[in-house]
Amino acid sequence: MTAPLRRWSIPVVAVLSALAVFAGPLPASAAPTPPKPSGHDSQPKELGDVIEAKNRDFVKARAALKKSQERQDELNVELRAFQAALNALAPQVNGIAAQSYRTGRIGAMSMLLEARTPDSFVQRASALDELNLVNAKQLAEVNAAKARVEQAKLALDTEVREQTRLTNAINRDRAEAKKALNLVGGTELTGGLVDATSPVARMGPGRTADGDWKSYDCSEPDPTTSGCVTPRTLHMYKEVKRAGFDRFVGCHRSGGPYEHPKGRACDWSLQNSGFAPWHNNDTRRYGNDLTAFLVRNADRLGVYYVIWNRQIWFPATGWSSYSGPSNHTDHVHVSLL
């Protein structure tokens, strides 16, 4: 699925381009930096910045998760200790309950009335008062132990919920960062020089209700040559231009296989005229951003595949290495369905 190599440039530029392919990217001093196209004076945030922020969020969430897990371990120890203390107090509670059942309020009154002397009455009253104090203290200890157990359980439940939230956040941030990077070809393709977002393209013509795309003939005048393009290719051309990519482009060419002769493909140069491999951050980023726009809007434009910088992208399979007759370091090729 290689794109034929015909160039829409003067012979001198074609020779320089061919030499550049064999000799590698030109040094920055070999060619002036072309001006940026309109609409690119104020660049949005780079994808690398977004991914860095996601990674920072991941690191913080992972640290918070670790602390939460440590807190959970501490709470488990406390909970076991509190439960053991509560279990140790159980016999005392049972004793108090049995004693209350045996004596009750009337039993205690009878105990006082049976006193034969004033001294024995006072002694028995004192004994009852002391017993009540002991019972009250023991019951207070039991209630405090119960409260600590309940608080530990609530804190433990809170930590478990927090861990679930943090784990979900970690997985979401990891997936979003990976998806965003993979969508535009990863750092190998872009070198980190790519916009984090792209303009949303208007829906192309011929999209059917089941999500397929209607076939079109080469019926529209090609704005880049004297040939023709399909209505969908013309729409894509206008949307790329509307997104601010105004450098040299050629679409139709006669003869040969693949999509150019059918009016279903365009080659988007990195230069204002002719073709030359990317040789600085400006030309590389232009190709990256244009590629990202096409890939991110593939479902709206009807993209068949994109080739750029030794990589090829299909909607069904994503990015993979490409080694056709052209390494596509001097233009972004896009074919339409």
Image (cartoon, rainbow, N blue to C red):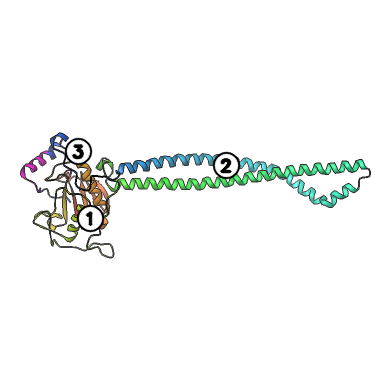
Q: Earlier in the sequence, mark 2 or mark 3?
A: 2
The disc at residue 303 is: 1
Q: Which is in the foreground here, disc 1 or disc 3?
A: 3
Contact check, label 1 and label 3, Cβ < 8 Å: no
Whole-number angstrom distance, CA of label 2 to CA of label 1? 56 Å
Q: Which is in the foreground here, disc 2 or disc 1?
A: 1
Q: Residues within 10 Å of mark 2 (few under 14, many from 20)?
A: some
Q: Earlier in the sequence, mark 1 or mark 3?
A: 3
The answer to whether residue 285 of the structure is visible from this angle is: yes
Whole-number angstrom distance, CA of label 2 to CA of label 3? 58 Å
Q: Residue furthest right?
A: 116
Residue 294 picture location, percent across and down: 23, 52
Is 40 contained in the magenta span? no
The kind of residue tagged 1 is Val
Q: Secondary structure at mark 2?
A: helix
Rendering quarter of residue 48: top left
* Left or right of 157 on screen, residue 256: left
The answer to whether residue 91 of the structure is visible from this angle is: no
> Magenta stretch?
8-19
